[in-house]
Image: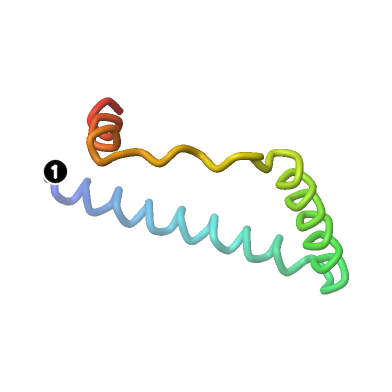
Amino acid sequence: MRWWKAVGLAGAAGVVATGVVVVRAERRRRAYTPDQVREQLHVRFAQATSAEAITEPTTPPPRDDIRSRIRRLFHR
């Protein structure tokens, strides 16, 4: 078997595996009733707003100049 055939078969297997994962996730998502989805969204929203109120800074962060931004970019 030539190497390009093996690469092609591996690519096809990857596409199939990705499709399987997507189908499983979609089935899991569709298993919820609309009321359950709405309730879960309300819970997540309440958690996000309470966490935001706790971590809200009292003073605005200092503005950075362009040199410090470039330095931070290259230090990563």
For residue 76, which quarter of the picture? top left
Q: Residue at x 66, y 40 (%)?
A: 58
Count of labels shown?
A: 1
Q: Residue 23 or 57: which is nearer the viewer?
A: 57
* Render colour scheme: rainbow
Residue designated by label 1? 3
Residue 30 relative to residue 2: left or right: right
Q: Amino acid at mark 1?
A: Trp
Q: Residue at x 81, y 59 (%)?
A: 40
Q: Residue 33 or 19: which is nearer the viewer?
A: 33
For residue 33, which quarter of the picture? bottom right
Residue 38 relative to residue 2: left or right: right
What percent of the width, then of the height, locates residue 24? 62, 59
Q: Residue at x 79, y 47 (%)?
A: 50
Q: Residue 46 or 34: which is nearer the viewer?
A: 46
Mark 1 Cα-neighbour bin, 10 Å: few <14, some 14–19, many ≥20: few
What percent of the width, then of the height, locates residue 63? 40, 41
The extreme top residue here reads 75
Q: Residue 43 or 3: which is nearer the viewer?
A: 43
Residue 50 relative to residue 6: left or right: right
Residue 15 relative to residue 74: left or right: right
What percent of the width, then of the height, locates residue 48? 73, 50
Q: Is residue 12 above or below residue 10?
A: below
What percent of the width, then of the height, locates residue 18? 46, 56
Give the structural element (helix, strand or loop) at label 1.
helix
Q: Is residue 14 above or below residue 59?
A: below
Q: On the rendered image, what quadrant is the N terminus found in?
A: top left
